[in-house]
Image: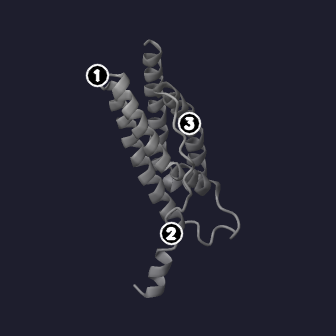
Amino acid sequence: MSRGKNAKAKQSTWQGNQQHDAEPESLQIIRDFVSRESTDELLFDYLKVLAIKEDKNGEAAALLDRMIQEKRGQFRTLKSLYAQLTGRPPEVDAPFFKTPKSLEQGIADIFIRESENIRKFVRLWTQIPPVFAPYIYPMIIQEQTHLTILNYLLLKLQQK
């Protein structure tokens, strides 16, 4: 294969297909998700520490740990998709981390964000090139599962 053909094979999905000043909505959504990676890590770690103090059997901390593990997989997949679509890794600025006042408040905040994430993932699923859509659907299911787990944790905390 000649060098010219190889260069074309490495061209990203979006190169040549978009105007220079218009970023596709799917890329904006991916960048939005990826920008929260570090704050999600901090939040879940902080909440796991609070959960260990409040829930002596460790169930809440274990569930939060499971959720952040799944989120790490989502972040890896989203960053990979972005690189495949653009030919470069996403460059983002992380939002400011705000420490929740309590375990219950932190879980409630995550619950609201996870609800919004489902809407964003569905939008991404409809906007991304069809060849990549099968990577998004499992994330929607994970977010729905996270809502169930968070709802369980909130109910458990309110019973104390």
Q: Position of residue 112 (x, y in %)?
A: 57, 32
Q: Residue at x 45, y 32 (%)?
A: 146
Percent position of residue 104, x then y = 49, 25
Q: Residues within 10 Å of mark 1 (few under 14, many from 20)?
A: few
Q: Which residue is mark 2?
A: 87
- The reply to whether discs 2 and 1 touch (Cβ–Cβ < 8 Å) is no
Q: Is residue 53 left or right of residue 77?
A: left
Q: Of tags 2 and 1, which is closer to the observer?
A: 1
Judge whether 2 appears above or below 19 on screen.
Answer: below
- Measured in 3D between alpha carbons, the distance from the residue under mark 3 to the one under mark 1, in whole angstroms, is 27 Å
Which of the two marks, 2 or 3, is nearer to us in this view? 3
Dot label at residue 57:
1
In the rendered image, which quarter is residue 62 located in? top left
**Disc 2 to disc 3, C-alpha distance:** 29 Å
Residue to which mark 3 is pinned: 113
The extreme left residue here reads: 57
The amino acid on which the numbered mark 2 sits, given as a three-letter code, is Gly
* Amino acid type of the residue that numbered disc 1 sits on in the rendered structure: Asn
* Marks 2/1: CA–CA distance: 46 Å
